[in-house]
Image (cartoon, rainbow, N blue to C red):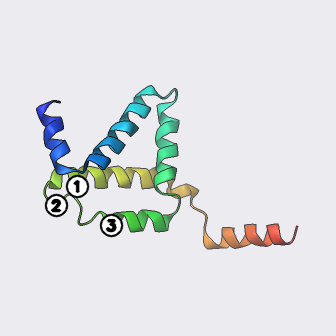
Amino acid sequence: MSTSTQNLHGMISKKQYFRYKKQLDELRESEDPEMYIYEKAIENFPNEEAYNQTMEDHECYYKKDPRIQKAIKSYYILCYTIVKDTFATEEEIEEELDSWVNS
């Protein structure tokens, strides 16, 4: 393991480390990297509430290394930017529910 990998590994849990490594490996192996990124963004943030909760939860994480904290926050902001237009509004959800109930 390289020194930078050892340093990174020391700052985050093993579970997180392997999760990020798995995602990077999957991205490198994917046939369509852009679609992979889009799908992961939707998986991470299916709605705005999930995004807001994740951002709130991660405010206190990685305090030992602000560089990692900033990088992960930037990643989450990027994911949000990619998927925010896919979030359904309350009105759209109600219309879809009404349509389903009335059909």
How far separated are the C-alphas under marks 3 and 2?
12 Å
Residue found at the far right of this picture: 103
Residue at 33% over, 38% down: 21
What amino acid is labelled 1 in the image?
Gln
The residue where tag 3 is placed is: 57
How far separated are the C-alphas under marks 1 and 2?
7 Å
On-image quarter of the C terminus: bottom right
Give the mark nearer the N terminus: 3 vs 1.
3
Whether the residues at callouts 1 and 2 have beta carbons within 8 Å, the answer is yes
The residue where tag 2 is placed is: 63
37 vs 33: above or below: below
Give percent across and percent down for residue 27: 42, 33
Q: Residues within 10 Å of mark 1 (few under 14, many from 20)?
A: some
Residue at 15% over, 38% down: 6
On-image quarter of the N terminus: top left
**Nearer the observer, 57 or 97:** 57
What amino acid is labelled 2 in the image?
Lys
Residue found at the far front of this picture: 14
**Nearer the observer, 22 or 73:** 22
Give the mark nearer the N terminus: 3 vs 2.
3
Q: Secondary structure at mark 1?
A: helix
Q: Which mark is residue 69?
A: 1
Give percent across and percent down for residue 101: 82, 71
Q: Is residue 98 left or right of residue 5?
A: right
